Image (cartoon, coloured by chain):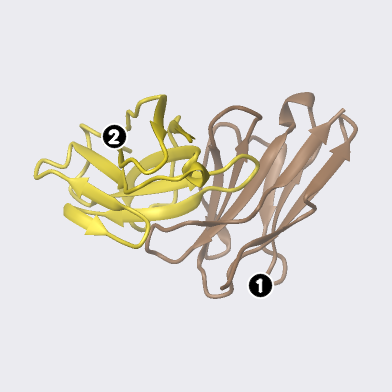
Chain colours: A yellow, B brown
Amino acid sequence: LAKTTQPISMDSYEGQEVNITCSHNNIATNDYITWYQQFPSQGPRFIIQGYKTKVTNEVASLFIPADRKSSTLSLPRVSLSDTAVYYCLVGYSSASKIIFGSGTRLSIRP
Amino acid sequence: EPEVTQTPSHQVTQMGQEVILRCVPISNHLYFYWYRQILGQKVEFLVSFYNNEISEKSEIFDDQFSVERPDGSNFTLKIRSTKLEDSAMYFCASSESTGELFFGEGSRLTVL
């Protein structure tokens, strides 16, 4: 399974766009890239998933370059409630062993 | 919106006791998982379950752990003889084959 590397923590301010980059140099051809969000004392929550190029939903955008060795989660106009840990995962869609890395602790300030 | 439900939300037990954590996955999902998270640490994979058998398990999931889907709706995690280091939040998750996991709110286990 491809290993992922993310910044341990990031800080930003309300109203800013936040970009969290994840490196996954050993990504395999059939691997997808998935991001989860976790608030304290809650289970992780799916944010977005992509295979290549760009994916956008009502919450975030996911940018994946052509070589797929990295990906960037973009959160537009963050608010205090976006303070959470964000996890980047890489694996194929029906994988039965889905491993979370250490995640990025995002802190949003007023 | 369908959700994964877990019980109990919090259980306190004595070291050496057996604990059963229960989960009701989303009804049309086929893949089931247990994860745990020790306070302040990352989410750790324990086991995945598909077609009534274990698909994958981690090195954490030793002989003290077992999983079962006894009645087609519940998915349980049993810890036979709890240790202090088993204290953690245990999360159940389920999915279709899309890679999107749906997590429950977790069961906090405290071993004294």
Where on the picture, by quarter, is residue A67?
Answer: top left
* Cβ atoms under marks 1 and 2 closer than 8 Å: no
Q: Could you tell me which chain the residue with mark 2 belongs to? A: A
Residue A9 as seen in the image, left or right of residue A50: right
Relative to A79, B75 lies left or right: right
Q: Nearer the viewer, residue A15 or A99?
A: A15
Q: Secondary structure at mark 1?
A: loop
Residue B49 falls in which quadrant of the image? bottom right
Above or below: residue B111 compared with residue B28:
above
Q: How would you rate the neighbour count of disc 2 (Cα within 10 Å): few for under 14, some for 14-19, many for 20 or more?
A: many
Between the residue at mark 1 and the residue at mark 2, the CA separation in whole angstroms equals 38 Å
Seen at 52% across and 65% down, the residue is B51
Q: Looking at the rendering, which quadrant does residue A13 occupy?
A: top left
- Residue under pointer 1: B72
Q: What is the chain letter for disc 1?
A: B
Q: Identify which residue, B46 or B94, lies in the foreground.
A: B94
Image vertical order of residue B110 relative to residue B67, above or below: above
Q: Amino acid at mark 1?
A: Gly
Tell me, yes or no, if residue B19 can be seen here.
no
Q: Position of residue B5 (x, y in %)?
A: 68, 62
> Helix or strand or loop: what does disc 2 sit on?
strand
Residue ID for mark 2: A22
Q: Residue at x 18, y 36 (%)?
A: A69
Label 1 Cα crowd, 10 Å radius (few <14 / some 14-19 / many 20+): few
Instruction: Compare residues A51 and A92 and report the one nearer the observer.
Output: A51
Residue at the spot 66% in from the left edge and 29% down from the top edge = B39
**Picture coordinates of residue B82, whole percent (x, y):** 80, 33
Query: In front: mark 1 or mark 2?
Result: 2
